[in-house]
Structure formats: C-alpha cells, structure tokens
Amino acid sequence: MMSSLLRRVLGRFEGPLRYRLSGAAFGGQKPAILMYHRVAKPAVDPWGLAVAPERFREQLSALTKARKILAMDDFVAALTKGVLPSNAVTITFDDGYRDNFTSAAPLLAEAAVPATIFLTGDMIGRRDGFWWDELARMILLERGPIRYALILAKKHVQNRIPAMPVTELPDQKWRAWEIPRTERQAAYRELWELLERVPPSERQKAMADLRRTAPPVPADADELPMSAAEVTCLGPGITIGAHAMTHQPLTSLPPAERQVEIAESKVLCSRWAGRAVTGFAYPHGDCDPETRSMVREVGFAWACSTRAATVDSKNYDLFNLPRLSAPDVTGKVLLRTLNRAST
Ligand SMILES: [Zn+2]
C-alpha cells in the first residue's frame, strides 16, 4: 500500500496538465517498474489499489506489444550490467491479496507475462484482512449510524455520523487524497492517518473499539490475503518477494524490531518460494538510509520504494528503486502515462 503523501502527490500529477507539461519535456520511453496491488472491482477503493480484470488484461496486451516486459530479477540484472532497454517494463504487486491468485495470476499466465508479488509475511492466511480495508468497510460501506470516541496517537477522536440515506450509494470513485465529499469520507481519512503510524497494539485496540460501533460488513474473499497454499500455486511466471511481516511503516519501529520485520519476512517468503527471495518492497514505501542498509545486510539483492518515477539507468539505488502506480485505465492510457512519466 502507498503512503498518503505519495498518493496526494500522484493525485496532483494525474490530470491532463501532466500530459501537456511532461509530454513536451520528456519524450521517449524510459524503463519502469509498475506497481499493482489488486485486480478486482471493489465497492469502494479509497487508495485506488484495484485495476479491473478486463482493464488488467488490456494493459498486459498493450504492454506486450509496446514494451519489453522482463521479470524483476532480469530487469535488475540488466540494469546493473548497463544493458537495460529504455522500453523495459517489469510488473510488481504489493501486499499479497487473494485476487492476485484468483484473477491476476491467470491473466498473467494467459499473456505469458512475468510478475513479482511482495508478500506481507504475517498476513498470509489471515482471515481478518488488512486494517485499511476493514476500516473502509466499517466507515465507507456500513450504512448504519456510526458513533465512536477513541484516543489515538494521544489525540481524542470522536464522531457521530448519521445513517447513510437509502438513496446514497457507496462512492467507488472517491480517493483518500481528494477532498472528502461526505462525513464518512472525512472520518475515514482522519482515522487512516492516525492509525497508519501508531504501534500495532494501539491500532488493534482502536480497531476493536471501532468494531463495536457498528455491525461488521463481511469482506469479499478476494479482499483478504492469499493462503500459504495459494501462494505456492501461483505458477511459474510469478516470483515471490518480501514486504515485511506486519506492514508497519518500518521507520516508525525501533531498529531491533525493524530488523526482525525484514529478516523474518525473508525467511518466511523464501520458504513459500522454495528458494531464497531476492527482492523486498518497503511497506507504505517508507524507508530511510538505515532501513535500506538493513535490507541489504539481511541478504536482499534489491528493494523497491513507492517513489513515483521511471528508472534512471545511469543514476539509481538498487535499494530504493522507484515505481509507477498502475492506474485503473485502458491499455492505451497506461502506455501514454508511462511514456510521459519522468525519472
Ligand atoms: Zn503494501
């Protein structure tokens, strides 16, 4: 999942103005690492994590025709040898959602396109899902009145939201980096920003308190993480990478806990992969020089952040590789976005 800051920045640049500005200044193709999360059509998607299956198929078809698609390890090998083609693209998925197994993997196999999936170690096989999705179900999908009073990050947070009018539908289009259009959207964003950086124990307590405010909206099975059995059946074109254990922003943790998050995820993901995993993705894209050193010292060969840029073949950090978030757009628009993205 991406940081709120990044999403806000991306939100500013995803309009037509971006095409006009960067199209003139940055013509030509540049190597890029694409970042996906889900291939699905969720009822709400505040972080824009999902690409619809038919769009994903179309994107793979367009990429296959216009670009050189490489597996991530081959992309990195070519980059370090100085022979990475300017039209190279590689595909990554973060978090380990079940729809990666049910929807993305079959479409990738159909198109004969390789991909890397970064798994959140502790979440694999869990039936309660990712906290940000549960929060979205509780606040944005639940239609009944919501009332809560919490202390989060030493701040009193309280709210009383009336029932959603019967004429109102959950807003699939609203994104959390946009101005909230409803009380529920404002509440979701406020809670997300506080919950993101508090310690896991504080987050779990707050989520338990929130669960008592309204009857739970059940998760769609594909919104949950994959099981370990599904991970091992992803197919030969899929490479496993690690995404830490709990998805806590790593720089919010003391060094010893950070080390455990990184090292344990390598052990666990290597077990599922049946070989030593080489790649890591920082949860929320959150990293600093100390964290990058830890990832290197644990034995990873490269790591991805969520800095939104193409890869500069002449000036790169293998432990801070930028990625471009793949939006839910047609193949044609995706290619145009890629061609106009800057390093
Ligand atoms: Zn993530």
Image: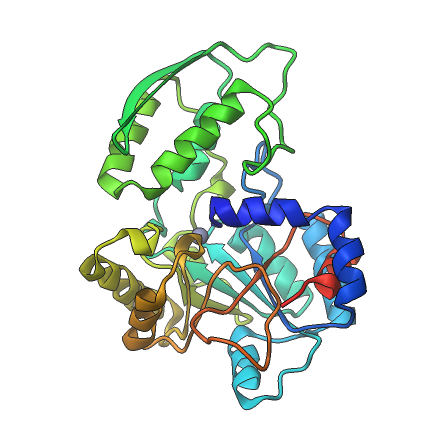
Q: Position of residue 72 (x, y in %)?
A: 53, 73
Instruction: Residue 128: tell me if it is visible.
Output: no
Residue 136 appears left or right of 256: right
Residue in the picture at 44% in, 67% down:
240
- What's the residue at 37%, 55% (across, down)? 120
Location of the C terminus by quadrant is bottom right
Q: Nearer the viewer, residue 117 or 199?
A: 199
Q: Residue at x 56, y 63 (%)?
A: 323
Number of on-image labels = 0
Lateral position of residue 209 relative to residue 180, left or right: left
Q: Which x, y percent locates residue 327?
A: 65, 50
Q: Position of residue 282 (x, y in %)?
A: 40, 60
- For the question of whether residue 232 can be seen, the reply is yes
- Quadrant of the image occupied by residue 110: bottom right
Colour scheme in use: rainbow
In this rendering, the answer to whether 95 lies above or below 300 is above
The residue under the point 46% across, 76% down is 318
Of 47 and 290, which appears nearest the observer? 290
Q: Is residue 124 above or below residue 115?
A: above
Q: Which residue is at the front of the view, 262 or 320?
A: 320
Location of residue 103 in the rendering, given as x and y in whole percent from the top left corner: 59, 52
Q: Quick one: which residue is furthest to the left in this view? A: 256
